[in-house]
Image (cartoon, rainbow, N blue to C red):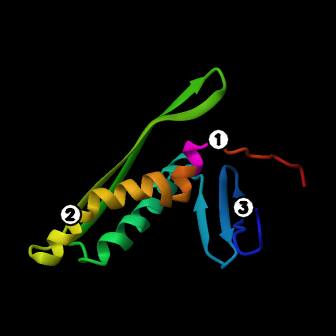
Amino acid sequence: MTTADNRRSVSIVRTAPGRFRATNSRGGTLDFGGDDEFSPVELLMVAIGGCSGVDVDLITGRRAQPDSFRIDVAGAKARGETGNHMEDLSVTFTLRFPEGEAGDAARAVLPEAMRQSHERLCTVSRTVEEPTPVEFRLG
């Protein structure tokens, strides 16, 4: 059930031919679409990796702060009978934690943190994996 507490929205305006600016309810902006900016497909991959990254960082960060934290998201753009879509999406985490007991604890919980993000916590990847209707309207 949609309520005021769980509703999310962004507004997107055209800023130039093929270029756009997204604005969220808090006033944050993101430009995309130009040759040197992110494409919408890349933004989808950013959203998947970023969502899981937040989950994994919160869980592992309770044990130790990482020395390095990198997420690579890749996939193939495909055209099928039902239209354009992405295939073979993968999210690869490369984290390094300090030596010692706290770092060992973070390394130990890392696989479970990734599993929880993938199977339950990350709203973005869960939405991509589950059938989610998208309604287009004319305003």
Compute the Cα span from label 2 to label 1. 33 Å
Coordinates of residue 19 in the picture (x, y in percent): 65, 55
Compute the Cα span from label 2 to label 3. 41 Å
Q: Residue at x 60, y 52 (%)?
A: 33
User: Magenta stretch containing residue 128, yes or no?
Assistant: yes
User: Magenta stretch containing residue 107, yes or no?
Assistant: no
Q: Are marks 3 and 1 in contact (CB under 8 Å)?
A: no
Eye-nearest disc, 2 or 3? 2
The front one of 65 and 111 is 111
Give amino acid for label 1.
Answer: Pro
**Quadrant where the N terminus is found in the figure:** bottom right
The front one of 50 and 20 is 50
Q: Residue at x 66, y 63 (%)?
A: 21
**Quadrant where the C terminus is found in the figure:** bottom right
Stretch of the chain drawn in magenta: 127-131
* Secondary structure under the numbered disc 1 in the rendered image: loop
Q: Earlier in the sequence, mark 2 or mark 1?
A: 2
Give amino acid for label 2.
Answer: Ala
Give amino acid for label 3.
Answer: Ile
Residue placed under numbered mark 3 in the picture: 12
Residue placed under numbered mark 2 in the picture: 108
Magenta stretch mostly in which secondary structure? helix
